[in-house]
Structure formats: structure tokens, C-alpha cells
Amino acid sequence: MDRIFSGVQPTGNLHLGNYLGAIRNWVSLQDRFECLFCVVDMHAITTWQEPAALAASTREVAAAMMAAGIDPGRHIIFNQSQVPGHAELAWIFNCVARMGWLNRMTQFKEKAGKNRENASVGLFAYPNLMAADILLYKGTHVPVGEDQKQHLELTRDIAQKFNNDFGVDFFPIVEPLIFGSATRVMSLRDGTAKMSKSDASDYSRINMTDDADAIARKIRKAKTDPHPLPASTDAFDGRPEAANLMGIFAALADTPVEDVCGRFAGQPFSTFKQELADLALATLAPMQDEMRRLMADPSHVDGVLRDGAARARGLAEPVLREVQDIVGFLRP
Ligand code: TRP
């Protein structure tokens, strides 16, 4: 069976964009693939993380995966740092990937900002660790958003160069799995910016831990434009807020955006927002309740992660052993 690997960084509150754009879509992959879903705590520390917050966020992401419907009995949920093979393979990939390749990564440029000299070495080498995540298990398919396509391309380049350099046909060339149009959830304050945990305004995002009041308030205050709602997605041009809110409605209702346009055409934002808030509350509440239940029992969540990590180590071990032989590392 083909194998999926995907990861989420435990850096701050999980929000609606993480859920609708990633985690929720993974649930449907469980029948077709063997899946590893990883809380990438080693990626998280490429920028400074408060240790207690990192641990709490690691549990929160794991709880969200379970609450969304990922079955840790049939598939693997674990945190990256419990499987040392990620770091070991990443080192080898540090020696395969070229400086020039990494210099082109747009995420590094964005995250490092103007002060590149002060960025961590880990932030620069981040894509090599991501390649190691996937290839440590010979993952064949990776569900990612648009923003991670470049990193996946790099993963393919690394696999190819490794195979060429050592004259082997060892690592698979991974395929991205890109989900439909509803995956890009934008800020509630600016329809042109991605919903993000690093946005200074909490009104820009719906956190998975927000209560009903907060969700309703944030939707009520969400930025709009002065026109009635469009009858078709063709009219989304120049109306990023309408596109975003109607896209969120469609994702939550699991219907095409065109249908949402059909239903609300010509109506004012105020009516639509009320319906959107009701829908958001109804759809998110069961999952939020389950997250809360899981987070109240951290030892259970830790047990799931430990068990997942043990199974992941079992899968990684033979791959790593072969890599060591290929490279010429003497091993025990
Ligand atoms: N870089 C990804 C993100 O920020 C997270 C990630 C780490 C990942 N390793 C991965 C995603 C491997 C897919 C596969 O979203």
C-alpha cells in the first residue's frame, strides 16, 4: 500500500486554517493509504519556542488529529523528536542538498526576514529535515498546502541526487496530494493574507480552542465589503473577504462554493454571517468537545504518541540501516 507522511508544527494555537486546510482532509486518506501523521517538534524549534508551550502545543496537535477522526490504532500519530532517525537522516541530507537549492526557498526568506544573519542554521536546513521525515519511511504521497510545494520539490531533488550519487534506486520520488479550493483559509481581517497563528490580532483567526462566544464574535467582526454577496465565484475578483468567508462556509458545509453563492446571492453580509456562525458552531463543537476531553487527560495523549513513535521507529530502522550501508557508515 502507498504510504502517506504529513506533519504539523506545534507552534501555538491550532486554528481553523490548520483544521480545514490540512487535518480534516487527512481523515479521508485513511482507507487508501498507510498513514504517518507527525507533530514536528524538531521543525518547531527552528524558531524560538517556550519549552512548556512547545510540550502543550504538541499534545494539542495530537489531540486535534485524534478528535478530527484519525485512528491511532490503524495509523501512526507521533512526535518527531521521539524517533532519532529523523535527525540522523537529516544530517545525511544536509550533505546531499546544495546551498544553492536552499537559498531559493521562499519560506526561509519569509521567515528569516531582513535579518538573515540572525536566523538559526536549523531554519535554513529546515527543508532537509522535512525530506528526511518523508523519506525515512519511504513515503510515497504527501498531503500539503500550496505553501509547502516548493519543499516537496526539494524532497524529490534530494531523493534523486541521493540515488544518483550512490548509484542506487532507493528513495521513492514523492507525489504531492493537493486538496481542492477550500484549503486556503485566509485571515478574517484581511482576505489576502493566510490565516496564521503569528498574526498579532486574535480576531484574524478562529482557534480550535475558541468557545462559542468567541467564534460568533470573530465572525461578526470579520472584514467584509459594502456589496451584497455574489451569485457566482466569478464575481470573487477583487472581493477577497467574500471569497474567504464563502469558502469557509463551503468547507464547513462540505459543499461546492458555487452552491454557497447560489444560496446567498444578493443577500447582505449580516444575514450570511449569522448563518456562518451557526454552521461553524455546529460543525466545530463535537470536535472541540473531543479535543477538550483528550487534553484533560495528557497521560493518555502521551501514551498514544509513545506508542506511535515505537511503531514509527520500527518502520524507520530497516530503512536507516540500508542508508548507512549505502553511504558506507560502519554500524553496530
Ligand atoms: N513544513 C510543514 C509545514 O510547515 C510541516 C512538515 C514538516 C511536513 N515535515 C513534513 C509536512 C513532512 C509534510 C511532510 O506545514
Image: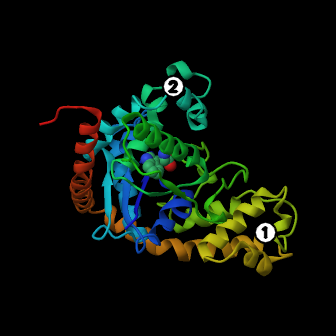
Q: Residue at x 77, y 70 (%)?
A: 270
Q: Residue at x 45, y 26 (%)?
A: 120
Give the percent coordinates (x, y) of residue 90: 36, 36
Amino acid under label 2?
Met
Q: Which residue lies furthest to the front in this view?
A: 167
Q: Residue furthest top?
A: 117
The local crowd at label 1, few if under 14, some if 14 to 19, many if 20 or more residues have their Cα within 10 Å, is many
The residue nearer to you, when weighing 106 against 116, is: 106
Q: In which quarter of the image is residue 257?
A: bottom right
Q: State whether residue 40 appears in this view.
A: no
Task: Report helix, strand or loop for mark 1.
Answer: helix
Q: Is mark 2 within 8 Å of ligand 1?
A: no
Amino acid under label 1?
Phe
- Is 202 left or right of 12, judged from the image as shown? right
Q: Residue at x 34, y 49 (%)?
A: 56
Give the percent coordinates (x, y) of residue 196: 58, 48
Dot 1 and dot 2 residues touching (CB under 8 Å): no
What residue is disc 2 on?
99
Q: Quadrant of residue 252?
A: bottom right
The residue nearer to you, when weighing 268 against 31, is: 31
- Is 31 left or right of 218, judged from the image as shown? left
What residue is disc 1 on?
269
